[in-house]
Amino acid sequence: MTANDQASRPVARWALQFPSLHADGGLYVFPCDERGNVPLDDLGRRALLEYLFARHMVGRTLARPRVVAIAEH
């Protein structure tokens, strides 16, 4: 593989998704590593509060979170 081939390949980035338990609900998404660890110190105040809220609502209005790969070029 050449350097050009590596440069054109997508790079995986990870996201932790909290899907809604309801059909009309939304989705909370936060950056994370491949194991689902969210860098809390890197989140802004609002994102941190939303993350803590999402964790609290698991089993109530949100499903258990899942780690997904997001391809970037």
Image (cartoon, rainbow, N blue to C red):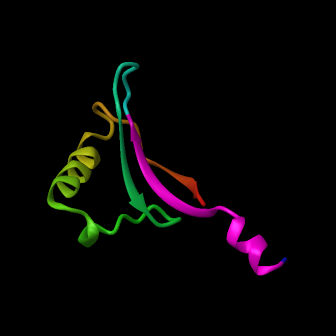
Q: Position of residue 62 (x, y in %)?
A: 34, 35
Residue shown at 59% from the left, 62% from the top = 12
Q: Position of residue 28 (x, y in %)?
A: 34, 42
Q: Identify whether 41 is placed above or below 29.
A: below
Image quarter in which the N terminus is found: bottom right
- Is 46 inside the magenta-drawn segment? no
Q: Quadrant of residue 2?
A: bottom right
Residue extent of the magenta highlight: 2-19
Residue shown at 29% from the left, 30% from the top = 61
Q: Position of residue 42 (x, y in %)?
A: 27, 70
Image quarter in which the C terminus is found: bottom right
User: Would residue 33 be found to the left or right of residue 8 on screen?
Assistant: left
The number of numbered badges drawn on the structure is 0
Q: Position of residue 60 (x, y in %)?
A: 28, 32
State the residue lying farthest toward the right. Answer: 1
Looking at the picture, tell me which residue is in the foreground, 11 or 4: 4
